Amino acid sequence: MSGSSTLKAPCSSRASGRRSVAVGVRRTSPSVTAPTRKAASVADAVLTLYQAEWCPFSSAVREVLTELGADFVARQVEPWPEDRNELRALAGTDETPVLRTEDGRLYRGTREIFAHLREQDPWQFAAAHRRRFADHRDARESDAAGQLVEYFRGTDQLEAGAGSPSEAEVADVPEASRYELRLGGRLIGLAAYRRRDGRIAFTHTEVDESCEGRGFGSGLAAAALENAEREGLEVVPLCPFIAHYIDRHPEYESLVASGYRDR
């Protein structure tokens, strides 16, 4: 493979049967999403953010609400401003974000919203959330969220594979910023990363559903970590699967960047 180096996928009894896709299962959370067209009564007594996931201004407001520990309802708006009739009727604008407080006051745009939120007292986890936000810069810049959305939509590149972990090969593909796990020439798994300043941040790990629970993900994680060790890189395990693997295999703990390990 051009621009890639092939690594041997370690096959050992250390491999766990844990689900190998670093995608969280959907759970009910304080932030509930609902389309704008749903009954407005849902939002009457709670803090409500009219927003779109792809909107950077909406994203900034959600981050501040997280720092404040504020539970809220996220109401989805139509993708095109000209179609946002309900939002216009409510707030007199078709632009996002719009924040509606529990008592019905409306704040339009990030400047008005932030001016209001600066008056609120943050909760005890505000500083920790700011730190975590900074930690995950690599995940944001490497489009880890976009990769996860591809998994949800079924448009990711992974293929089903037949065989054992000992037959799989791991290749570092730097132009794609990921390690690829292949079995019989098929791409069955990947571990995405971002490298900078002598560090490698693992942002997303995934194997095809047909290969889950069989040790393929563990082999991929081990090969990627051992390659990082050979290259003298510090590891930032933003990916939950990689973090869990390191927790279960303390021989890799020394690779974790000190500022991240001490948290």
Image: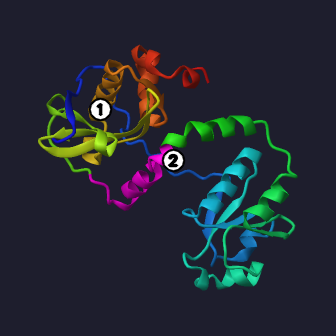
Q: Residue at x 59, y 84 (%)?
A: 83
- x 32%, y 40%: residue: 178
Color theme of the render: rainbow
Q: How far across and how far down the image is residue 167, in percent?
A: 14, 31
| Magenta stretch, main secondary structure class | helix
In terms of depth relative to the viewer, which is nearer, 173 or 121? Answer: 173
Q: Which residue is mark 2?
A: 140
- For label 1, count other residues whose C-alpha is less than 10 Å away and answer few (under 14), some (14-19) or many (20+): many
* Residue 176 at x, y percent in the picture: 31, 45
Q: Is residue 10 above or below residue 114?
A: above
Q: Is residue 229 magenta?
A: no
What quarter of the picture does the N terminus occupy?
Answer: top left
Q: Amino acid at mark 2?
A: Arg
Left or right of residue 200: residue 118: right
* Image-quadrant location for residue 196: top left
- SS under mark 1: helix
Query: Do the residues bearing badges 2 and 1 touch, measured as CB atoms within 8 Å?
Result: no
Residue type for callout 1 = Leu
Residue position for label 1: 220
Q: Residue 81: give x, y in percent of width and height.
A: 60, 80
Q: Earlier in the sequence, mark 2 or mark 1?
A: 2
Which segment is the magenta one? 139-157
